[in-house]
């Protein structure tokens, strides 16, 4: 059996991929351009990808493909309908990054609420040392205790964020397609209106694309903190940029973008570096521990497929 990893650089240079060799002949490419797809896949049976788009536009040139493994939970870059038509199995990885995505979500919220960037700079640039009092208390910051934290999407990550938010003394409200026992579930408009902090943890699909629209951003409190660690296209990115420029929202923390990396003419480029804006390069999922777990899960998915078993199958 032949296995090819098409965009290994997305997992980092410190991850050992040799574990896949026990299942067959392994070829690893650090990246694959769309025009290189057919040559890189060639007669491979198993294709491992992270962000590369695959489907009816490139898979017909690779008739030997039997299994596609995505090194992520989301699989919106895979044409699952085409794979189903052609009998190509598709596996994702679930739960490998729950802890560190929740960790970054909470870190962003705390940093923005406490204005850590500004306070750190006041010491680093000498402002504090040149002062005549023992403290600096501007910009004014507030306790997170007692705030309402709205969570959009309540899978593994959303639940973990909810657990931490409650531990910090927040009231948690949740928007999810199905009701969740023991949680206060609300519609998306109510969540946008009532939340002091909003974090997004929902997959991208036809029902969630553009869910956080210009109209819903306008419903948010002027001091609300908005965090997106799900998928960029869940949010109207231009509208969110306008909300920051017009001071209609308190701050944003964003780790995902509709185009990655986002180009220099992207709306977000105009607000990068502002004190109330945190942009990270889609790294929330990528602690060393999570990346190792992810690779181990892919190996188990391949092993199950070869044994005729279904494991983490989305198709």
Image: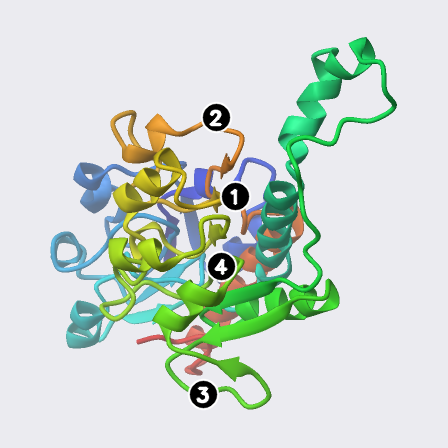
**Camera-nearest residue between 276 and 19:** 276
Residue 173 rendering spot, x and y as whole percentages: 53, 74
Q: Residue at x 63, y 53 (%)?
A: 106
Residue 299 rendering spot, x and y as whole percentages: 52, 63
Residue that extends furthest to the bottom in the rendered view of this protein: 181
Q: Residues within 10 Å of mark 3 (few under 14, many from 20)?
A: few
**Camera-nearest residue between 96 and 65:** 96
- Label placed on residue 198: 4
How far apart in space, not on screen, are marks 2 and 3 (Cα)?
Answer: 39 Å
Answer whether labels 4 and 2 touch (C-beta < 8 Å): no
* Residue 166 in the figure: left or right of residue 77: right
Q: Which residue is mark 1?
A: 283
- Indicate which label's residue lies in the foreground, 3 or 4: 4
Q: Earlier in the sequence, mark 3 or mark 1?
A: 3
Image quarter hosting the C terminus:
bottom left
Answer whether labels 2 and 1 touch (C-beta < 8 Å): no
Residue 144 rendering spot, x and y as whole percentages: 68, 56
Residue that extends furthest to the front in the rendered view of this protein: 132
């Amino acid at each position: 059996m032949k296995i090819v990893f098409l965009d290994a650089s997305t997992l980092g240079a410190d991850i050992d991929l040799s574990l896949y060799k026990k299942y067959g002949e392994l070829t690893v490419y650090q990246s694959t351009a769309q025009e290189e797809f057919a040559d890189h896949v060639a007669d491979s049976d198993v294709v491992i990808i992270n962000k590369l788009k695959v489907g009816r536009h490139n898979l017909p040139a690779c008739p030997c493909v039997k299994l596609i493994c995505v090194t992520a939970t989301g699989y919106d870059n895979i044409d699952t309908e085409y794979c189903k038509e052609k009998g190509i199995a598709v596996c994702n990885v679930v739960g490998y990054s729950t802890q560190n995505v929740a960790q970054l979500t909470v870190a962003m919220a705390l940093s923005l609420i406490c204005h850590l960037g500004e306070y750190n700079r006041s010491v680093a640039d000498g402002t504090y040392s040149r002062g005549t009092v023992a403290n600096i208390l501007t910009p004014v910051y507030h306790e997170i205790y007692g705030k309402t934290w709205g969570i959009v999407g309540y899978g593994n990550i959303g639940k973990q964020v909810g657990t931490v938010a409650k531990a910090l003394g927040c009231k948690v409200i949740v928007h999810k397609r199905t009701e969740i026992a023991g949680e206060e579930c609300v519609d998306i408009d109510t969540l946008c209106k009532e939340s002091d902090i909003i974090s997004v943890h929902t997959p991208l699909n036809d029902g969630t694309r553009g869910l956080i629209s210009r109209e819903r951003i306008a419903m948010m409190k002027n001091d609300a903190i908005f965090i997106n660690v799900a998928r960029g296209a869940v949010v109207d990115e231009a509208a969110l940029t306008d909300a920051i420029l017009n001071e209609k929202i308190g701050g944003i923390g964003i780790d995902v973008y509709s185009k990655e990396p986002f180009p220099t003419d992207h709306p977000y480029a105009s607000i990068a570096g502002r004190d109330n804006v945190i942009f990270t390069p889609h790294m929330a999922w990528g602690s060393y521990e999570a990346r190792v777990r992810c690779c181990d899960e892919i190996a188990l998915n391949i092993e199950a497929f070869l044994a005729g078993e279904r494991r983490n199958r989305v198709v």
